[in-house]
Amino acid sequence: SRRAGAGPGVMGPAPPGAAGDPEVMEPTLEGTGEEGKKVSSKKRTLAGSPVEGLLQPVKLSRAELYKEPTNEELNRLRETESLFHSSLLRLQLEELLKEVRLSEKKKKRIDAFLREINQRILKVPSIPEIEVNKQTWLKLGSSPLQQCFTVKGRFRFLPPVQVMVVGSYLLGTCIRPDINVDVALTMPREILQDKDGLNQRYFRKRALYLAHLAHHLAQDPLFGSVRFSYSGGCHLKPSLLLRPQGKDEHLVTVRLHPCPPPDFFRPCRLLPTKNNVRSAWYRGQSPPGSSEPPTPHYNTWVLQDTALESHVQLLSAVLGLSPGLKDGVALLKVWLRQRELDKGLGGFSGFLISMLVTFLVSTRKIHTTMSGYQVLRSVLQFLATTDLTVNGISLCLSSDPSLPALADFHQAFPVVFLDSSGYLNLCADVTASTYHQVQHEARLSMALLDSKADDGFQLLLMTPKPMIRAFDHILHLRPLSRLQAACHRLKLWPELQDHGGDYVTAALGPLTTLLEQGLGSRLHLLAHSRPPVPEWDISQDPPKHRDTGALTLGLLLRPEGLTSVLEMGPEADQPEAADFRQFWGSRSELRRFQDGTIREAVVWEAASMAQKRLIPQQVVTHLLALHADIPDTCVHYVGGFLDALIQGLKETSSTGEEALAAAVRCYDDLSRLLWGLEGLPLTVSAVQGIHPVLRYTEVFPPTPVWPAYSFYQRLRERASLVPRPDKPCPAYVEPMTVVCHLEGSGQWPQDAEAVRRVRAAFQLRLAEILMQQHGLQCRTTATHTDVLKDGFVFRVRVAYQREPQILREMRSPEGMISLRDTPASLRLERDTKQLPLLTSALHGLQQQHPAFSGVARLAKRWVRAQLLGEGFSNESLDLVAAALFLQPEPFFPPSSPQVGFLRFLYLVSTFDWKNSPLIVNLNSELTVEEQVEIHSSFLAARAQLPVMVIITPQDRKSSLWTQDGPSAQILQQLMVLAAEALPILEKQLMDPWGPGDIRTVFRPPLDIYDVLIHLSPRHIPRHRQAVDSPAASFCRGLFSEPRPSLLMPVLGYDPPQFYLAQLREAFGDLALFFYDQHGGQVIGVLWKPTSFQPQPFKASSTKGRMVVSQGGELVMVPNVEAILEDFAILGEGLVQNVEARSERWAV
């Protein structure tokens, strides 16, 4: 199981912002009556369970346990078996529906409010007839329409003929938390004139009708607020929003939509091929030739108002008698909302989903007896497999030849779904990009449901997918007014005329098509998000198109095509070559290729992997400037802002992939040398790397080292170097550990001490041969041989495969041998067997997903920057990062470090570590059944397992990599910090005007510590790796060019780490110490609360304590002043000062 939620109502830690965020809906049990009592008693047993928050099985008496099931229970079991994956899924869905549905109590209050509205609308006074253009009578000062062209016609206000509730409230499919009730007001025929369908006359009258209503209703004390907004985002169709007064203010929003009387507009005048906005009126000039361009969107917006009543009748006829269909629609709405697909103009709204369910019922793909879950599956299956941009669908069953053909609609609209009249395209405003995004999400969701994962419900309906976390790169186009120039450049006059001057909508389709064509094989999916147009007060002018913020595009990238620097075009003599040149402009050039052909080609400048990942930015900015007149200053591209945190000392263009690859190549060369060594008594059977560099997850990869001897003293008798005390601390050099396995032999001794000695002899011989045969600098100890090759240092450990077995053998006094795990045997097995397997599996994962390295390194950089690195092993953080690629559901595997890091923060902060193991299925070795078994054995043995449990195919029970930490408190602190960092970072990256200081979330919160020990940068070898990299630091005694090196550099010399080890040894029982190994200048100290309790006086335990008299007795308490003095004395030369925050502790 991946995430929190082992059962309905018992969810894990809520995601950040769960309380007020409409995107995150956590089901809670709202028991009433006897049911409620049962729930609360169950909660009490949970709260009092041995380990707080840990799920415990419910205890049943023997009679209850073996009681025969009732008929009702048998029917329910049969139903669950045939209609759901599992009874757990059924319970979860029922709880979710209970949570999002409106309660009867609230429905009554809403109905009463609607009756009051009805009475007040019918009482609004009428006004005499006047010219439409003369708005002096308007009490509000202006109409809620943006552009006021001169419009012919006369207008008068009369109360509506009919006030009718339309939409999901009436059908019972509306979902919390935002309850909207749509009310259609049928305007009297006398207000309208025959030619009102032309030149926005109808829309002007509709707006004036609303303005007059708004003026009168605003004076009524019944309403807490009376405001305008755009209906579905269409700027020609404002609607009036009414909210109740007082405590019910957030109960409901009632939206008033004026509509024409039935049969007023003739549908044949509103076909997609017809024109109803004349060029002479809109542009002031007639089009060249006599043909007017069609206005399909304008015609659709008029038709939508005529069809409100027929749509609600159709939906109530289909959904009315089937609770399963209603449940399905509610679940689909939750699904859309979590994916942000239902927002604004052109969103895939809840109304469209309801109509789609109606269509599938009419084509018998869905039956009215189906459960909500089956409806959800059927609709997702249909969306995943049906492309409405190619083959439209229609609810119209008539074969009348006068009806327009589907082909006419396909010519006018990107997505086609006709209503039952055959004239109205319900998906007229949905762009091709949005529909493809819906299809993509439906495919991912179907794969998730088909996998029958335990946490499918959690991932499908409870995990929010904001754009910044779902897409690899994001780009913001701002200011929006720049899109006017794009419309002129792209010659979009007909589209502007059709959309009533909405240049954002007019330019959106052509721009997305342009970018999709340019990004080609790099792109998996392109999506767009328009900021919702805010509501406005009835006394204000409506917002302009340019006022709504920025247009945001999301790019989901393909890792296989992403890093190619070449766009290969057609051969020079082909007719397509001219099109290619025209599309790419000055970037296209003729090139001769190795096969002899001469082709058009575009080459992008990118030397490093980090630059190659950002080639889409070059493509986007070039094409937008060339074809749409949008300069790169108006494009804010968000894809590589976090790269700066994993860049090397002097690197500004590389994030270290090249340095890691160079180290791995050097390791490969060394392993070939070891394989081919001659003169060893036993041949080498395997060479396996176990260092993070060799699985591409070292935060700052090593660079070749050529030490300047002036920084060292030479010990002649040992031919080695020692750092000079009068110089700054030399560069930190970490050896890369390699395990060298020797072939089996009967000559090996069977005694542990003898094996160690034979291994030491092998280490000596290995160094001797490497120096003789290959001239490599080596230094040997009894446990390892350090080898200097091409500036990299490798630590080669000889391993004997039976040694862990020998260390397990225990001999009794009688001579009996028994096997028992010992700390030494477990450690040796981990280092020589488990770690090489893990390293090779993660090395393979990096080949498959090139972004893995960046994600794992960013994750480790962040955890260590929070001063929590000591609590988490390298391997445990690598595995959490790997889980994002191996079980990415409900997302697509990340293709950029940025999105992977955001998902890492989300996973860490929301995963239910208490009740679930994180299963990292390396190489897909674990089957679904095995994962279920792992989960069961985890729950049975929970008390004996570490706080954080990570399971891999090689380590199915013990969670090897988290045995030594973190503690419960450290893990909790990490979850809290991740939950706080995620919304801050997402907000920064989604800001169209720049992220500000991206390092904010990497800086640790120092106010939680009792004491801060400030260190001198002179003796911090990795000072330049700090989050806020210093402008200047000390020279660390390295040459930048290769020099002949006769002596081994000093290895693993990091004074802050030695100082930390001393502090922990001396004061570990009194305090906890926290430090960022990557250049941290501060050690945070937290006193242990237990150490400040007075202890009885004992002469043996006086370290760090002083004797005081309490109540006539001598007791011992920590001597804080002396301890702080000791901190400074122990770190003399390294410690700058010790800052005691005395207000945070008391003795």
Image (cartoon, grey):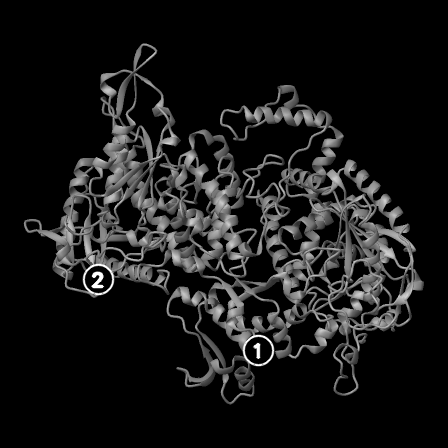
Q: Tell how many labels.
A: 2
Q: Residue furthest top?
A: 1112
Of helix, strand and loop, which one carries label 2? loop
Residue sitting farthest toward the bottom: 573
Is label 1 in a helix, a strand or a loop?
helix
Residue 569 appears at what percent x and percent y? 50, 80
Question: Which residue is drawn at the image coordinates 52% and 49% (left, top)?
Answer: 983
Along the polypeptide, which appears first: circle 2 or circle 1? 1
Neighbours of disc 1 within 10 Å: few (<14), some (14-19), many (20+): some
Residue beneath disc 1: 627
Amino acid marked by disc 2 = Asp
Classify 32 as above or below 211: above
Relative side of 172 to 962, left or right = right
- Quadrant in the picture for residue 1147: top left
Q: Residue at x 58, y 53 (%)?
A: 466
Q: Position of residue 968 (x, y in %)?
A: 43, 34
Q: Which residue has dot 2 on it?
A: 790
Residue 333 seen in this snapshot = yes
Amino acid on which disc 1 is placed: His
7 horizontally vs 683: left or right: right
Residues 412 and 292: in front is: 292
Figure quadrant of residue 143:
bottom right
- Around disc 2, counting alpha carbons within 10 Å, would you say few (fewer than 14), some (14 to 19), or many (20 or more)? some
Disc ID at residue 388: none
